[in-house]
Amino acid sequence: MSIDISANLQYNITVIYNIVISEGEYMPTEHLTTLERIHRAARAEFLEKGFARASLRSIVRSLGMTTGAFYGYYKSKEDLFEALVGTHYRYLLGRFQKAQDEFAALPRALQPEVMSDISGVCMYDMLHYAYDHLEECKLLLCASEGTPFAGFIDELVEIEVNSTHAYQEVLNSLGRPSPKIDPQLEHILITGMFHTFFELIVHEMPLADAENYVTEMRAFYTAGWMKIMGQ
């Protein structure tokens, strides 16, 4: 029985191509809708130059469109950037806030036992989400200066600060007194924690490495915070 190797090879190539197309990766420009072409060109422009320096005219010109045609899709550069990052900004912020709310809703006596587990699940979820939407999250982290999204990390810091204070009150109520933390030091430490986390995404670490780094980072920061909180 003979096997047609060339036919099998052609079949495998076709299957791989169809999988790649279905996943939306490396799709040839001619297979994209006009909106998808706009988004692809805009991501490239924003990632290279940042929002403030990016040129809407350059994006439109690279597509061979007229400005009038572009305005049929978006009213401004701001609206275009919102379309690219808004959903991801809201998801990441909401996911982090949800984790804090779920933790605060637990019985007080249980909170010290599960704090690390709940925060860990949240950070891994955020990491995997960011890797699933890597370019858009890099836009949010690296290219959003001059947009309402530029304060993303500051908003996460504020959520964490409020949660830290609420947890200290829980510890105090359980007879495990936690000293007041210097506000400036607290802000520096929490901001540094988020920047450390998002460095994994900015530098596109291999996901398996990033997962390991998150595990090590959590161990480091958890031990440090417990020390500062007198636990």
Image (cartoon, grey):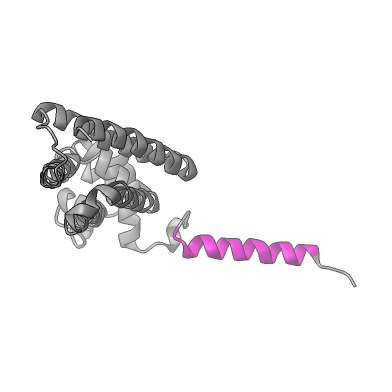
* Rendered residue at 24%/54% (across/down): 110
Between residue 209 and residue 206, name the one nearer to us. Answer: 209
Residue 49 to residue 65: above or below: above
Instruction: Residue 71: give x, y in percent of width and height.
Output: 18, 58
Instruction: Residue 96: give x, y in percent of width and height.
Output: 23, 51
Quarter residue 107 falls in = bottom left
Answer with left or right where residue 84 lies relative to residue 12: left
Secondary structure predominantly adopted by residues drawn in magenta: helix
Q: Residue furthest right?
A: 1
* Segment colored magenta: 5-24
Instruction: Residue 140: give x, y in percent of width and height.
Output: 25, 44
* Rendered residue at 10%/27% (across/down): 182
How many discs appear? 0
Task: Reply yes or no: does residue 164 show up in magenta.
Answer: no
- Image quarter hosting the N terminus: bottom right
Instruction: Residue 151: give x, y in percent of width and height.
Output: 15, 41
- Residue 62: tell me if it is visible: no
Residue 120 to residue 54: above or below: below
- Residue 226: tell me if it is visible: yes
